Image: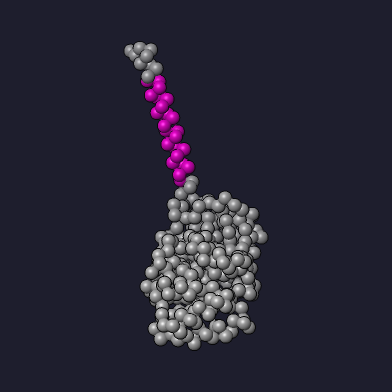
Amino acid sequence: MLNSKEDKVLLTLILSAIIMVFVTIYLVSNKTYKEEGYIQNNNIHIINTGVTFESTFQDVFDKNTDKFGEYDIDSYSPTINSNNISTDVWNRIAKDIGSVYHKYDAFIVLHGKENLSYSASILSFMLENLDKPVILAHENVASVIMKASTTNISEVMVYDNGRLLRAARTIETKHGFSSPNYQPLTEHNSLQKPTEKPQIMFINPKKYIVVVKLFPTIKSENLIHLIEQTKDSNVSGVVLETYDNGNAPTNKLFLKTIKKLVDNGIVIVSVSQNNQNVGVNKKLKAVGVLSGGDMTTPAAFAKLNFLLSNVKDMKVMDQLMDQSFRGEMTTKVET
């Protein structure tokens, strides 16, 4: 027989065990709810710019109804050929998301494969302070809807072969899409939840950005043409794809041409042709070229559009290019 003191100890142990069981059940169920594979977003809005659903869509849907949130579709008519994507289309997509943002838990933009990395990058800058997922994809619509239904990552992303890639890190390859300087997204490496309200930062169609890829025999005349057209056109920025190590021609005529472009008010950002984090060559920097760090060309193009459309003081452009707004870059290294 147990005495009264032993009874109390035994009762305490039993109660502790019961409490631990309930705590364990709660933690397991709570973790299960947050894990991907279970519906996080019940209402999904799909903007289809012109993608055809795969023939197996209904079959996949029927077999995975527990992983599909409710969804509706806004199909553009006429459809948008992604080869002809434009600033007006980007502004339209952003506006359409913004107009119903409060009604849905997640958004999908179906977009042709061509230029998808550019559209994803630029939409990531346009959609500021997101607290809901926005996913761009060009195929496997059923899988994309499942991913949008079950993810709790709140930023603009690209869906590729079951993975979510950060929009402003994504490039197109012959095998699909990849994120050369950043791992596929999880809740542990995604952007932090914003503290400010979501808003749209539209792109000014009058700001025209060009991409110039350097090559061994490039001549200054190729760049002078930009200068000659500047007074009658609206060239506002240049993404300069330098050699893999961040270098470029350093002859006097080439540097003089670059300086003249900068003096004419054109913002030039240097990025590596293979997305290395090499900073900007010192001689290019001396004539006013800004560093794009390890940004991809689509990200640099998008960031320039975003900044030139929404920043009036060009004197702070260098500081702003150094900042990572959407996780588009890591630390910079000067050469």
Give the main secondary structure of the magenta stretch: helix
48 w.r.t. 23: above or below: below
Looking at the rendering, which quadrant does residue 50 occupy?
bottom right
Left-right relation of 17 to 313 = left
Left-right relation of 227 to 285 = right
Q: Is residue 261 magenta?
A: no
Q: Which residues are magenta?
A: 10-32
Looking at the rendering, which quadrant does residue 23 occupy?
top left
Residue at image coords 37%, 73% = 245
Quarter of the image with the C terminus is bottom left
Q: Position of residue 94 (x, y in %)?
A: 61, 64
Residue at image coords 49%, 50% = 38
Q: Residue furthest left?
A: 1
Quarter of the image with the N terminus is top left
Q: Position of residue 271 (x, y in %)?
A: 45, 71
Q: Position of residue 257 (x, y in %)?
A: 49, 82
Which one is in front, 7 or 127? 127
